Structure formats: structure tokens, C-alpha cells
Amino acid sequence: MKPTRMQEDLHYCQDYFAYTRRKSREIMVGNVGIGGDNPVRVQSMITSDTRDTEACVKQILELAAAGCEIARVTAQTKVYAANLENIRDGVRAAGCDIPLVADIHFKPDAAFEAAKWVEKIRVNPGNYADKKKFEIREYSDEQYAEELERIRDDFAPLVELCKELGRAMRIGTNHGSLSDRIMNRYGDTPLGMVESALEFARIAREHDFHNFCFSMKASNPKVMVEAYRLLVARLDAEGADWNYPIHLGVTEAGDGEDGRIKSAIGIGSLLSDGVGDTIRVSLTEDAIYEIPVAKAIIANIKNSHIPTDPKGAARGTLGYDPFSYNRRKSHAIEINGHKLGADNTIRVFTTKSNWDALAHKIDKLGDFTPEAVIEDSPVITVDPYDDDAIMKLNATEQPQLVTISDDTGCSVIHGFRLLASKLAAHHPILLKDTLSPSANQEAEFIDNLITASRNIGSLLCDGIGDAIIIQGEAAPGQSLRLAYNVLQAAGSRIFKTDYVACPSCGRTLFNLQETTQKIRSATGHLKGVRLAIMGCIVNGPGEMADADFGYVGGAPGKINLYVGKKAVKFNIPEAEAVDRLIDLIKEHDKWVDAPLDAPTVI
């Protein structure tokens, strides 16, 4: 993986091989500081109808009691935004001072109303004073400048109002809702996401308003990580006073184990590089369940990273472009009848003890089957700081599967990056989730899940890794399931149906949790099919671009169905919509009947 010109000129963190937290300025959201020397803050968003004061107040108070530090409420129109006054008063009357954020899409007048009552306004550059109709047109420089001037006229008054009232702002770009103007000039890319946000930031700065932060959310962790990295690099290139705080999140992460893994990959990999000042874990579950996951991700970073080189060894260059995914080009080898390396599937290893524990049901594990035993495989272990040992390996023409020795004293991400930067490209690499194998059956699974997702997921997003092994989860079946689910969430190996599901909010037009489970039950056997389940149209059509089919709330009780990002069925009664979705999948020859003998659940 050769670095590109972009990688040579831009840097998103101080040190790619050791942890250093990015130095950002402090902004204030009410009484809560974000950035600077503040800890990483935890946020969430309520799902109640903004017109229902009692329900909103109750949910906000529950979030605050669970440890949420900033709570977001949707304000889809001026009428909804006006009720934020009553919600705020109810929360304050209960003795709770948690700052409130108004989530704004499409309606500038709702933002102006909301700014009167809450401490922070979230605007989405893709649909605030901009448009998304999936129109294809060429913008001349003059036409593009005219559009920017129109946006300036609509956005600048909100900036002035926030400045006058002491409000904070989040300029939050979503991959699924880039405007037509941005899409036509930059494409559906991390660069387009960054440019969209910077346009709005420049307007804020023209009015000497600096109490704002950025976000770059996407449902695909690879896209999300690349966008945030590019944003931070671009901010750094703009100048020292562009050190605004960063809000992290994987949007539409989904539910259950999959949603937690996706969030840990995206958020955890960036926090591991010192990027991120506040986070929100977006799960298709009750909002209160997001808080312990967010807190666990933050704690996991604190407990897992070494701020300096353990051995003070000299380091090389990164060796690849961190702003554009490319898989490291190793040579192919075969182990236990499975090819790995080069463009082959990333393989799943296990230990001999785990293999033996599962031997009686190996043939029933289906897609969760282990593919090689590490003790019985020709795996070379090295210390990434041992230059002599790596030089000897590099002199070997025959490709060898290489991994880091356990208990080397380095953090996993930085250690494997260092190994990849020094190791000759023809040698494939076996990734480990931890360098301290665990036999503790009582360890919290969520901690093991976050560690594996953050470490292995981050490296996979860097293009590093030809095989993986989970060493931190002692339960044999769970360790295998976790390995495969991390590969799926990182987009590195698709072995089951993939779901993109939004976390619900006051805009949602149907019960997301019940519907998601119903769709999962009907379609969970469709290996490799990607389905998007969206409560409304804010991000729906854009996130459909990566999905095969979409199920989107179009109106109360009515569902629109999509193929890709194109709506093809409209206003279907909710009671019929799942069956109609199945019919649509069948029409496009993506349907197979569920097998009668399902694999053993592990």
C-alpha cells in the first residue's frame, strides 16, 4: 500500500503509532464543556413526539439518570420547535440541567424558533437551505457560487442568533443526505461530506462565531472513519484556530450485537487515534440502552492504550493512505485448505482448545465454522519493534503468515500498524483482538466485543489483515460469532443479511424496533442482501445508495419501498409492507427460501 500525495500532505493525528489525544478548543453547550481538557462527552436522542411534553421530559430525565450528558430532540417544524420551551421548562423544573439540542432538517424557521429555548442547534448542511432531489446537473463555478451565496443568506441569520443567545451549534454532515450540489461536484464521497461542512463553517467564522463542533456520520464504518480522518486533516491544514471539537457517531448502526460492533468499530477506531470529543451510539433500541455502550467504548479506550512507545524504537512511515481504503497487497498462501492473502477471503482462526470444545458440532456451525487452528498453522510471531527479526522475515521470498507475539507491551492497533509499515508486502498478516489472551469465562462480553471491534475493525478499515483470531473472549462459540460479526460489520466478509437501521426519533413514522425484528425474522437467511430500515426520509434515500432494498416511513402508517436509492412502491399500508418488501426482493431475484435445518446458534 503506497501512500498517495494526500497522505503525504495531510495528517489526522499527531502519531500513527502511539496514542495522543487531538487538542481541540473548548465549546460550551449550556454548562457542559466539549473539547479542550474535558472528558469525552456522552450524548443520546429521545424518540418521543416533540409535541408530547410529558413523554419528552420523562425520557430526557431517564437519559440524564443513566449518565447521558447532552440530550437531543427533533424539531421538524416551527410548531414542534415551539414546544421545546415547555420541554425545557419541564426538565428544569425537575432539577435537571442537562443541555438540550434541537435536531434540525429542512426547516430554517424551526431552527430560529428552537434557538430561543435550547442550548444547541444541530444543522445538517445537506438539507438546511440546500436541497436533495437526486438531480444530475453540471454546476459552473458561477452557479456554484450563487448557490453558496443563497445558503449564506439563509444560514448567517441563524449564526447571528446563536451568537447573540450564547447557543452552541453542530454542523453535522450525513453521508446519506448530501445535497445535489455537493453530490454533483464531489460525488458520494468523504471529500463531499467534508466540503459540505466546511462551507457552513466558513460562514460561521465570517460572523466571528466559533461555538460549534463538527460531525461526519455514515452507516458504513469505513466511510465514516475516512470522512472524520479527512475532516481533521483538513481542519489542521486550514490553521491552528480551526481546532473545533468533533462529535463521533455511526448513523443507522442497527440493533443488538451488530449495532454495538459497528459503533465500536467506527467510534472506537477514531478515539484510539485521539480524535473525538463527544459521542453518540445510535442503536435501534430504546435510547437509554445507548448510554452504557457509549460509556463502555470510552472506558475501553482509556484502559487499552499506551501513550508512548513501550520500547522507544524508531518508527517508519505509515505506508498507506489513511483517507482512502485499499487492502494491503500480500501474496496468497494456503492453510488448512483455505486460501488467504492477496484478494482472498479474510479467514477466521481459533485456538486448539476452542476447536476441541466445538469439535462435536463443527459440521453444524454453518457460517460460524472456524477455518484454522493457530497452534497447528505455520504462523510466524514477531515483536514489531524488533527490526532484526523483521529484516530476516523480509529477506524470505516465500510468503509467511505473520502476527505479533503476545505480551509485547504495545497496543494492538499501533502495534499492527507498525508491523505493516515494516513487513515486506508479500507476507500476509494475522490480526489479534488482544495480545493478552483471556481464559476468564466471567468477563463482561460487551467489553470483549468492544475491544475486538475497535482493534480488529480499525485495522480492517486501514486495509490491514488477511486473517483474524479472537483471544479476549474465552467462550469458544461466542469468540467465533464475534469474529465473523466484526468482519461483516467492517464490510470485509459478508456472510449474512446486512441491515442498516436508524435509531428512531420523534420524526419516525412507525415502530422501528418491532418492524426491524419482523423484517429480520423474515429475511435473516438472505446471505449478502443489504436492507435499510428508515423511520423517515431525512437520511433514507441517501443511505439506500449502499442498500439493495429499503423500507422507509413515508407518512403515518404508510411505507415507501426502495430499490437502491430509488423509491418504487409508495404509501403501502404498514400492515402489508413487510410482505410487499418480500415480494419486491423476489421480483429482483434476490430471494431464496430459508433452509429447513438452520445452523447451530452459538
Image (cartoon, rainbow, N blue to C red):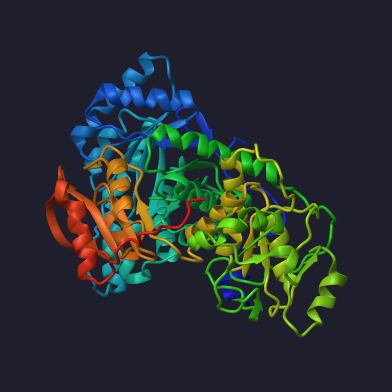
In the rendering, at what x and y percent does residue 59 appear? 35, 26
> Does 571 sit left or right of 195 as displayed?
left
Can the viewer see residue 211? yes
Residue that appears at 58% across and 45% down: 24
Residue that appears at 48% across and 30% down: 69
Residue 355 against residue 285 in the figure, above or below: below
Residue that appears at 85% across and 65% down: 386
Q: Nearer the viewer, residue 245 or 490?
A: 490
The quadrant of the rendering that contains the N terminus is bottom right
- Across the whole image, how many numbered discs are drawn on residues? 0
In the rendering, at what x and y percent does residue 526 appear? 35, 63
Residue 200 against residue 29 in the figure, above or below: below
In the rendering, at what x and y percent does residue 150 appear? 25, 56
Residue that appears at 32% across and 40% down: 103
> Does 477 sit left or right of 394 as displayed?
left
> Does 102 sit left or right of 30 as displayed?
left
**Which residue is situated farthest in the right direction here?**
388
**Which residue is situated farthest in the front direction here?**
360
Q: Nearer the viewer, residue 406 or 115?
A: 406
Can the viewer see residue 539? no
